[in-house]
Image (cartoon, coloured by chain):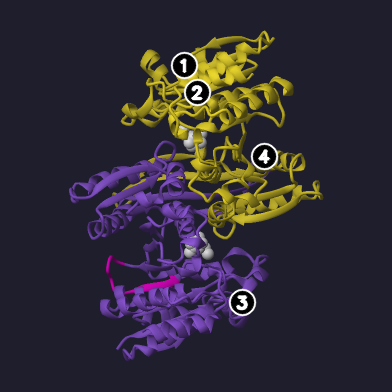
Chain colours: A yellow, B purple
Amino acid sequence: MALIALLAGDGIGPEVTHEARRVLEALDLGHTFESAPVGGAAYRQTSHPLPPETLALAKRADAILFGAVGDPEMDGLERALRPEQAILGLRKALGLFANLRPAKMFPGLEDASALRPEVARAIDMVIVRELTGDVYFGDKGRSITHTGLREGHDLMRYDEVEVARIVRVGFEMAQRRKRILTSVDKANVLETSQLWREVVNEIALDYPEVKLTHMYVDNAAMQLVRNPGAFDVIVTGNLFGDILSDQASMCVGSIGMLPSASLNEWQGTCGLYEPIHGSAPDIAGQGKANPCAAILSAAMLLRHSLADEASAQRIEAAVIAAIAGGARTPDLGGTHSTAAMGDAVLAAL
Amino acid sequence: MALIALLAGDGIGPEVTHEARRVLEALDLGHTFESAPVGGAAYRQTSHPLPPETLALAKRADAILFGAVGDPEMDGLERALRPEQAILGLRKALGLFANLRPAKMFPGLEDASALRPEVARAIDMVIVRELTGDVYFGDKGRSITHTGLREGHDLMRYDEVEVARIVRVGFEMAQRRKRILTSVDKANVLETSQLWREVVNEIALDYPEVKLTHMYVDNAAMQLVRNPGAFDVIVTGNLFGDILSDQASMCVGSIGMLPSASLNEWQGTCGLYEPIHGSAPDIAGQGKANPCAAILSAAMLLRHSLADEASAQRIEAAVIAAIAGGARTPDLGGTHSTAAMGDAVLAAL
Ligand SMILES: CC(C)[C@H](C(=O)O)[C@@H](O)C(=O)O
Ligand SMILES: CC(C)[C@H](C(=O)O)[C@@H](O)C(=O)O
């Protein structure tokens, strides 16, 4: 009996997490749910995107099911008060350093991808992205130069412990899959990347069965277009991971299908689970959003935080069956509403 | 009568610049050529990737035709001596802050792209990348934390003048094209990006005819897969530009077809022109490399540095005609050697 924190957030967040909750409840696992405001929605209520009560619930819960944050009406706010600070703050406060983002072609959805079907069909990778360091969390600010110019700066940095723990997650993941690990950096330009590469090579000694390749980030962005099926596991820093994981998910076609997990230890119990899509304010409240990414995030929650692999697989199979049965939200070229897509998954359960 | 510096560099650099020179000479424009070693080749001769004589020639010349640098045998060298430092050093020393990278589908090459033909066919954009600032040139180094850990850091930074001049290049370029400018940043996380966005909005007031959109870099990486044909001009910083321009060029299919220009002022006279592909050590010296990117770089050189639009267009038309006539190097699925491809372009001139 676990406590699941529901942080639905902004835009389509509430709609899609509602369907994910319905699916979890249908499994009748006895877990309890508690909701709290986050992001722009929380700012409207409390003048802060991550109120203390929300953070307290997140810490108390066994796992967090997260919707999305982001609200264009708040673009003018200072950075510390913007909706995105909620997710950055949660990652940092809970030490969620390991972001796992699977990208796999769903049978039947080849048409949704801009890639040729034979290229898209081969995609089956996991991107392991570091989530609590890098230029995201280094010293940052604005100042005036001695010649009177406005300037902005953000420090990119990693220490060896931060690198080592995420790289181990990458190797462990590769070990359980096809044993091919690609570490992505920009070591020909960045010192941070040179440390990264050094640490990767040290840890590689513990995983002789895994085939390791180092790749520059610009080349990785090319190879993800040219032949994404060649990747198994990619491990990289926070910024490069942000870019490459979104690119990879679009290769699969609809980003409405892809979940993610953010963990504070490899296979640890505390985790935050969220669809990789954003708050999509343009379609919010219209029942058009695809709830599959949120539903599959709930499956990852069961697998990683509640050690319930069987239920996770049941949900995943139900989503695949619903798609195979022809259920399609507008992003997949169909006419199913958010609720109808949820119904299709429930029916397949 | 201009002086063109030929810096052929490593790997396939000498082979492809040789063909570009043949094409320039065939036009009989009276320009003179002077060569100097650069990159790994220069390191072998002089123990430095950018010897003073090479830099002096680059400064003296009216324009630089550059091949490629990069040599895996030198991965072990300290950063300051690696081949890549030659191109970074040239950019900085000559103030080449504006990198123009057109990415356009060549008629007849749709099959080379991993994208669906209808998606690939629509691609016609220019990426304008800042080239002398950002995390590439900020303070960088390695140190030991107070708890004894190795760390690496690189400072990302821009001041308003650095941002303004590249953003103006972007607006001017858009003005001459479809008047659609996408500025790419990560303003929801980075202070550097917030300054960037602020300056873009200020300069936009001078270009009311240009339709400006701000896009986060992760979203841009997605849209470049989903619908690359929607972009006209993209303007962005050094690091994001490195990643996105390589991604965009792979969307077009063969990176063996794409040239680039690095300018020190908008439509200024000093410029460095290079294919966007690298030194490709795996195929070096085998006559397999596609010289089209180098030949098209020579066309850009005539256009931007020597104000010879007519000759530039003659070269571009000849490359298109050669491709239409069926000439294909191995990267395009054919069997033409580097020299045979050069011959085909010369024949079409
Ligand atoms: C909302 C934003 C701060 C966030 C990030 O950049 O990490 C998002 O893009 C993501 O990938 O989860
Ligand atoms: C060789 C390398 C330093 C360079 C860069 O990152 O700028 C290259 O990737 C490029 O895009 O010209």
Q: Which mark is residue A51?
A: 1
Say which residue appears at 53% left-offset and 53% top-offset: A225
- Classify A57 as above or below B239: above
Q: Marks 2/1: CA distance?
A: 16 Å
Identify the mark nearer the N-term, 2 or 1.
Answer: 1
Q: Nearer the viewer, residue B2 or A24?
A: A24
**Residue A31 lies within the magenta run:** no
Do marks 1 and 3 both belong to one polypeptide chain?
A: no
Q: Amino acid at mark 2?
A: Gly
Name the chain under label 2: A
**Residue B7 relative to residue A145: left or right:** right
Q: Marks 2/4: CA distance?
A: 24 Å
Q: Which residues are magenta?
A: B265-274
Q: Which residue is mark 2?
A: A67
Q: Marks 2/3: CA distance?
A: 50 Å
Q: Nearer the viewer, residue B146 or B69?
A: B69
Name the chain under label 4: A
Q: Amino acid at mark 3?
A: Ala
Label 1 close to label 4 by CB (< 8 Å): no
In the rendered image, residue A51, in percent from the top left (x then y), is placed at 46, 16
Helix, strand or loop under label 3: loop
Q: Marks 1/3: CA distance?
A: 59 Å
Within 8 Å: ligand 1 and the Cβ of disc 2?
A: no
Q: Which residue is mark 3?
A: B284
Name the chain under label 3: B
Identify the mark nearer the N-term, 1 or 4.
Answer: 1
Do marks 2 and 1 both belong to one polypeptide chain?
A: yes
Helix, strand or loop under label 1: loop
Q: Which residue is mark 4?
A: A166
